[in-house]
Image (cartoon, rainbow, N blue to C red):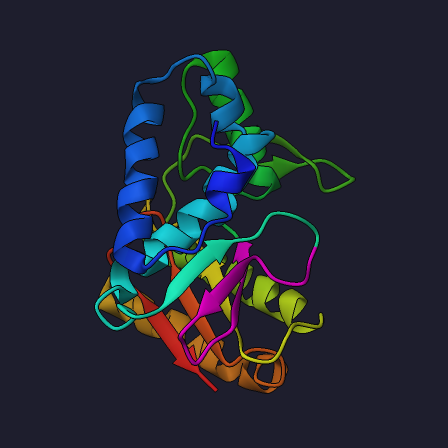
Amino acid sequence: MIPKDEIEVFREPAEYILWFESYLETIGRDRAHREEALQHKGFWKLFYEELFPLYSLLKLKQMRWTESRFRNVIGNQSFDVEIQNNRLTHLEIGTTEFDDTEVFRMREFIDNGYVSLLGKPRRDEKNRPVAIEDEARPHDDIVQERIDSIATLIESKSNKNYPNGTGLITYYDDFSIVFNESDNEAIRSRVDGLRPKWECTFDVVYLVGPRGDKLIEVEK
């Protein structure tokens, strides 16, 4: 676990990356909290859904943001990250990487030792996941599913109020499949098409995933 007062410290990108990676290494060796981590419970929700997305973004922007400083802010305020020395003042973080399907998927993995990473969920009459299909799925179907989730998240976040100068990190699952250039262009095109919905709320939308090797950036 990381103390709150250590999390909420301003750091330059290179400092943040080194700090976060020191905990990644420790956590990778720690099996005591495996189930909580897999299900993003408690502290692990913060770790994987707020700290990790900022880390992934800073890895890709560190050379352009060398003079800027960032800190995660824990709580119910209308932003997740505060920024100094940057044209942006804040970042909001939203994730499609761990929705109710993934919660159910991880529970199945914990209980059974195996689950399909790409299997489509079967849902009951109340739209709750009840099983994961263990069948191959076309790449394009999975990509479209991810794009639809991204669009839903951006539309939802765009209906809320944030400080002026806020950027949106949309953290999506780029880990279980490999997106090709055509896929990335389709994501960019969908976000650009949503511009009338988000440009009055956010200055820029960043799309990044756990791999941290590809950034899609759409400015207003």
- Residue 41 lies, in percent from the top left, at 59, 29
Q: Is residue 192 above or below residue 59?
A: below
Q: Is residue 114 left or right of residue 154?
A: left
Question: Which is nearer the eye, 49 or 155?
Answer: 49
The residue lying at 50 percent from left, 19 percent from top is 35
Q: Residue 119, can we see it?
A: yes
- Residue 68 lies, in percent from the top left, at 35, 69
Q: Quadrant of residue 143?
A: bottom left
Question: Which is nearer the eye, 108 or 200?
Answer: 200
Q: Is residue 117 left or right of residue 194?
A: left
- Residue 150 lies, in percent from the top left, at 51, 62
- Residue 88 lies, in percent from the top left, at 47, 76
Q: Is residue 165 above or below residue 132?
A: below
Q: Quadrant of residue 58?
A: bottom left
Q: Which residues are magenta?
A: 77-95
The residue lying at 29 percent from left, 51 percent from top is 15
Q: How many marks?
A: 0
Q: Residue 146, can we see it?
A: no
Question: Which is nearer the eye, 148 or 162?
Answer: 162
Question: Which is nearer the eye, 30 or 170?
Answer: 30
Q: Is residue 18 left or right of residue 57?
A: left
Q: Is residue 91 above or below residue 87?
A: above
Q: Is residue 48 above or below residue 142?
A: above
Q: Does the stretch in magenta take in 158?
A: no
Q: Is residue 156 left or right of residue 35?
A: right
The residue lying at 35 percent from left, 59 percent from top is 57
